[in-house]
Amino acid sequence: MKKFCFLLLFSIFSFFAFSERVISPVQGRFANKQSLILDLSDGAEAFYSYTSTNPLNSGFAYDGPVLIDMNGAVSLYVVVVKGSEKEQYQINYTVNESNPFANGTFEKKFIDRVSLENILLCTSENIINVPKSLQFSIGDGEKPKLSGSTLSVSADNKLSRYIPCTVTDGNQNWRFIIFLSPGEAGSFSQTSVPFELSDWEDFTFTGKNLIWCIDEGLWSASKESVKIDRTKPHVIYWQDVAYKAGNPIESFVLPAKPSVRTEDFDKAVAFMIDGDLRYRMSVFSSGAAGDSHADKGVYTSLTFDTFDGDYVKATAVFSLYCDGVYQGKIPVPYEIDRQPPLPPKFIASEPGEYARRDVRLKIDSEDGSKVFLNILGPFNVNSASYLDNNSEFDYIKPGEYFVYKYQPIELRAGVEKAVCYKAFAYAEDKAGNVSEISSYKVIIDEYNYFLDADAPSFAADGSRLHPYNSFEQALNVINQGKFVHFFVSGSVNVPKGMSVVSSNCSFTGMSDARFVLQPSSYIMVKDASLEVQNCVIQKDIETAQDSDQRFLIVEKSAAIFEDCELLGNFASSGTVLSSDASIVTLKNSGLTVQSSTYACGISSVNSKISLIESHVSSISDTAVNFSLKGGTFALNSCDCKVISHLGRILEAGGTNLRLSGNKYTADFDRESKGIKPVWTDEKCLIIEDKNNSEIGFSK
């Protein structure tokens, strides 16, 4: 059959086209030299060259496998001729020889062997050991990659073919050819007879000076072909043409045409003759790609087999002999499946290893294969450390598998925590071959986000790789209603006007994290909770008319600041933190407020205020650290200071107070009289007041 009708002007062919003739080389990039191997089992002739000139004019005749001793870019031209038909091929590939493995290692020796020999013999006695650290695939195209193992074949095997194999270390590919060779051939003895048979039914008498007859028919000397019925046995007689009574008559019993049946055992295929016991068969063609049957031994039965990782589906053609007399050919379809299916593919509704919402997980596999699945989780992720090192759950190994019913699997998000799931799956085909195990891991995190002031805007989604870069983006996520945790880097500008935090959130500073409020900006936390760790929150004055007295307002909410600095600079008057019916806590933090007329650190109404191991400074003409109305107030181990004309540490009305271990400092611009650090009205209840010291106040 003519496969191509145009000249050598093409450079790309499909694998299917090459698989029929050109076993090696194929297109690609390889780390070893390649061999030229053609399938000419149909009696065709081939010629090849390494230039664009026609190989029929100035090429080499192909008479068997040959190593192409060329590096770099190689262009091979092949012409196959069979009768009046001509096939033409061009194969472009690249060789960059490499063996990156250390001297003395198994990998080094194996790649050296592949590079030197390129065609490796495989029999029951000649095994091929592929290093376990490498992966290999049998054939070309999309074939499963298998972990290195031992390749061998049964001693009974009579299948002979050239089989491509590619090994890889994940970076480079080494392609070589496995020559699957049959075992010892059966004996062949031929009986001399004066006739020929072709296609079973065509009988031609070839004897000289002889006459013949079939069964009890008439004697004849004809050399013309006749048809005979092979569904039943016949006897062929012949004697000397000079017919005389008593002449010796010779005969040959021609049995009925047999059949060849197959039996499968342990994935191999046995072929057996059903018919007269004198029949023997030889392999005319295996029908498989890369067929190479120089051996024409004869057998009463024979076996086709191959090594693990290979797959053959073809129609073998056997030549049948009776007492060494050729009878005809019998085609027999067969299949040997030792190739595992491709590993299943996980298809997730959310791409990557991180998801912001529930994940729908489906598994795709080869047609006809059964998938076994194992899902583990959810496992709570207690911190965001996984975002820099996602190996936290790599120790998890597969558990018990169940049959996948091809229904989507729902992986649910955690409750105010990130969770991790791991899934494992393998496929099993109808022949019982099992694929490599596929794995899938996802961390579903609706809560942890990243905010980096210096990040680009492109593809920003709040992930570690694509963080948000503006406070507006963060606020939009916060106010969707679920608790979120932001990791902050750089100086993040808070936009003009009021920014309302209406849902629970947390900010953790990672690298010089700070929120910078413009003079007209302020933040309101309303009916929510706010946690801030390791951040600076500052408001700077530019012009008096742009300045707003408000900074942080906490209304019916809870706010915790730990290892933070709150810095407020106002044109005339201002308060850093105002609390109404809320809970506010400062731990190991600092609060500094400065203005020209009046400065207050924390102002609260009916709130619970706590400061632990923190420092507070108020700088203004009139300055106060804390202005309290109702609620409770606890100040423990803190350093509090006012720098002013008039000032106090604390002014409280109707508040329950606990004050212990604090240092109160006043730096007045003139000597003050009668000013105490703490002022309370008659409705206040001082529950605790001990170990406090004061400097700069009136004695």
Image: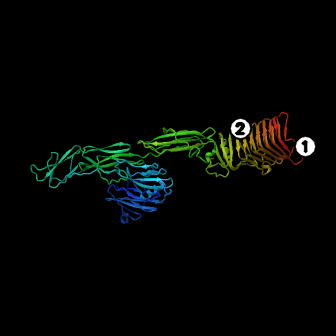
Q: Quadrant of the N terminus?
A: bottom left
Counting residues from the start of the chain, the first of labels 1 and 2 encountered is 2
Task: Using the image, determine if residue 500 lies above or below residue 25.
Answer: above
Q: Which residue is labeled 1 in the image?
A: 673
State the image quarter where residue 121 is shown. bottom left
Decide if residue 442 is on the left or right side of residue 663.
left
Disc number placed over residue 264 in the picture, else none: none
From mark 1 to mark 2, how far is it between C-alphas?
43 Å
Pinpoint residue 430: horizontal percent, then vertical percent: 41, 41
Pinpoint residue 432: horizontal percent, then vertical percent: 42, 42
Local crowd size for mark 2, using a 10 Å CA cut-off: few (<14), some (14–19), many (≥20): some
Q: Which residue is labeled 2 in the image?
A: 527
Residue 623 shows in this picture: no
Q: Secondary structure at mark 2?
A: loop
**As shown in the figure, which amino acid type bears the numbered disc 2?**
Asp
**As shown in the figure, which amino acid type bears the numbered disc 1?**
Lys
* Viewer-nearest residue: 325 or 83: 325
Residue 354 shows in this picture: yes
Pinpoint residue 310: horizontal percent, then vertical percent: 41, 48
Q: Nearer the viewer, mark 1 or mark 2?
A: 1
Decide if residue 33 is on the left or right side of residue 376.
left
Pinpoint residue 318: horizontal percent, then vertical percent: 30, 49
State the image quarter where residue 366 is shown. top left
Q: Secondary structure at mark 1?
A: loop
Decide if residue 543 is on the left or right side of residue 186.
right
Which color scheme is applied?
rainbow
Q: Residue at x 22, y 43 (%)?
A: 232
* Residue, far bottom: 58
